[in-house]
Structures are given as structure tokens and as C-alpha cells.
Image (tube, helix red, strand yellow):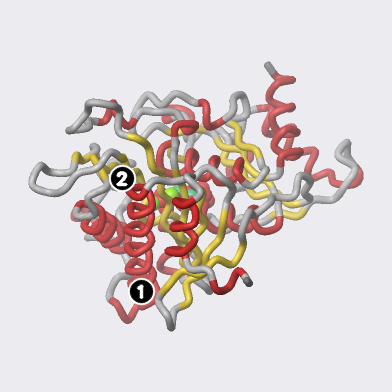
Amino acid sequence: MSNTSISLTRFLIEEQRADRINPDLRLLVEVVARACKTISIAVGKGALGGVLGDVGSGSDASINVQGEAQKKLDVLSNEILMEANAWGGHLAGLASEEMDTSHPIPDKYPRGNYLLLFDPLDGSSNIDVNVSVGTIFSVLRCPDGVTNPVDADFLQPGTAQVAAGYCIYGPSTTLVLTVGHGTHCFTLDREVGSFVLTARGMRIPEETREFAVNMSNQRHWEPPMQAYVGDLLLGSEGPRGKDFNMRWVASMVADVHRILTRGGIFSYPLDRKSADKGGRLRLMYEANPMSLLVEQAGGAASTGHQRLLEVQPTGLHMRVPVFLGSKTEVEAAVGYHAKAG
Ligand SMILES: O=P(O)(O)OC[C@H]1O[C@](O)(COP(=O)(O)O)[C@@H](O)[C@@H]1O
Ligand SMILES: [Mg+2]
Ligand SMILES: [Mg+2]
């Protein structure tokens, strides 16, 4: 049977039959996927939906816990995910990049044993210019005996994730998912309204000639990153002995999707601008889920000093430096950091 005829629902049922997920996790992923379809419709309406632009302006601007101005679609996507999942019956609690603290599922709703974390809309700066954005999510188990989870219950390393994924709202709407047994890609058939398996067991090529980084931060980087990118830019005339291409969409979902599709390295290193915060990208909502997807596709993910999935979170909104993608290239970047000590 061809991949094109396998829906997400059928794929998840097959994973359950193979004992790779339980019914609760299957239904939880279905609820998240349904919420992503709703977000996809809102994003797709663009200016027609009245959802472009910021929430408020000037002194009335809405600033989230990350210290960033909220876009209308950040808030709407967060509401869609909250509403869909509060009623799903498979969660004990939720946490979002857009909310100050975690939220236990209220007593009056059915509750389950999982914790869901999400970046409701990734790549916010691209919303108003019609460039791909997405939703990133991560699923953890609620610690045994905890019925009303608090922030501390979410502070589990990325290795504890039982599922992770993202949905990218681009030329097509694509859901990329792992439940710990490979990374798989589903494309939304808009006419039918269902996600269809379009790539089973994605594999990231080990070698690459493409890197993704925000070069405008170059002067703020630490010496190992300066040396690493300096050598990439020297190309075939430098120690790497080959020419590299560069891409930077500024939506992590889009940059990671390219890397899962054709290889590459994505990096958001520590720089002087973000050093006091520990980095730019959020461990729980961005780095951990993407690292699991990348590792499950044969790639690697590191802070430059440590396997990303082994970082012990110290706060819900903790930030980290990120290097992920083609294995050999991530190892090369880590090598420059190791040399510097
Ligand atoms: O603005 P910069 O420095 O290019 O940073 C872009 C990075 O910031 C992010 O947009 C952060 O995501 P949010 O839009 O969820 O805040 C990443 O998706 C992306 O990789
Ligand atoms: Mg983001
Ligand atoms: Mg976001």
C-alpha cells in the first residue's frame, strides 16, 4: 500500500497495535493535530481574517513572559490549543511559551496523565510578511501521584519526552511527529481535512554543505562560534575543504523542516545579546521537541557542550544555545567548542 493512503489516525492506531503508544497518547496527538488544523485555517486567512499585526500598540502593547510583543496570531493559536486540550481528557496540565506559568487541568474537566508544552506560533516575526510559521509541541508524563501539576513537575529533561512534533503552516500544512520510534511527516489534504503520511522514517543526511544562523549576530558570538563559522565561510579555500551555502528563514519550524528534508545545521549560539538569559531559544517549547525529532531522524542536537536532550531544565522558560541537524556537522561545531574548553 502506498504512503499516500495512510491517514494520521490510521498511523496512530497502527502504532498502538504495535504497542508503541497507548490509547491516551494516541488521542492526545489527535487533539493536538486537530487544533493545528484550526490554526492552519486562521493563518491561511491572512489579512482577510483580521489576525495580522500585534495585540495593542505603544504603551498598550501586549508583552508576553518572554519579554516579546505578542502578535494576534500568537494569542489566538494559544487559545485554540488551550481550549482543544483542556477538554481532551488525556492531560494533567499544560504549559505554553505565551503563558507565565503552567496550568493544571481544572477538576471539573476529565484529566489524564500527560503534560503538554507548546510554542503555539513559532516564527512570529514572519506572520505579517506571509512567510512560513508553525506550532511546536512536546509531551511528558505527569509524575506519579501528582494530580495538580505545578511548574516543577514539567522540569524534566528532553530524554523524558514521550512524543514531540511540529506543524508548519507553509505552502502546504505539514505535521512532523515522533512518538520515539522514528520521525514521520504528514501533509494536510485540505479537501479531505485529514493529515496523510507522506514520509515515513525521515533520515537527515549525515554530511551537509548548508548552514542556518542569524549572521547579523556575528560580532556578538563567543570565540568558538566565530572560529567555526569563519571556517565555513572560507569554504573550499579553508580547513573544511568545501563550499557551504547559507539559509535563514527566522522561523525555527521552517529551518528545521528544511534540515529534516535535505540536511544542514541549524544554530542559535550564545551571544552577548542573550547571554544573561542563557540563549535565544526556549528549551521546553523549541529546543527539546526539535532535538527529539532530529535525533529520531538520525541527526544530532547539542548546546555546543552537551547533548541537548540531557539538559536538566531549571525553569519553564529556560533558554539554551542550540546546534542541531546533520550529525557530522553538529559534531564539527561541538569540536570547536571542545577545543576552546
Ligand atoms: O529574530 P532572529 O534572531 O532571526 O530569531 C529567529 C528565531 O526566533 C524564533 O522566531 C523564536 O520563536 P517565536 O516566534 O516563537 O518567538 C525562532 O523560530 C527563530 O529561529
Ligand atoms: Mg518559537
Ligand atoms: Mg512563539
In-image side of 52 versus 149 (left or right): right
Question: Seen from this angle, which residue lies furthest top?
Answer: 341
Question: Seen from this angle, which residue lies furthest left?
Answer: 108
Can residue 287 be seen here? Answer: yes
In-image side of 227 versus 195 (left or right): right
- Three-letter residue code for mark 2: Ser
Counting residues from the start of the chain, the first of labels 1 and 2 encountered is 1
Q: Quadrant of the C terminus?
A: top right
Q: Which residue is mark 2?
A: 96
Mark 2 nearby-residue class (10 Å; few <14, some 14–19, many ≥20): many
Question: Which of these two is toward me, 43 or 237?
Answer: 43
Residue 125, picture quadrant: bottom left
Question: Which of these two is toward me, 150 or 244?
Answer: 150
Give how far across and how far down residue 169 sits, in percent: 46, 67
Q: Which residue is mark 1?
A: 41
Task: Please give the name of the residue rendered at 44% of the width and 23% of the height, measured from the top-left corner.
Answer: 312
Residue 84, picture quadrant: bottom left
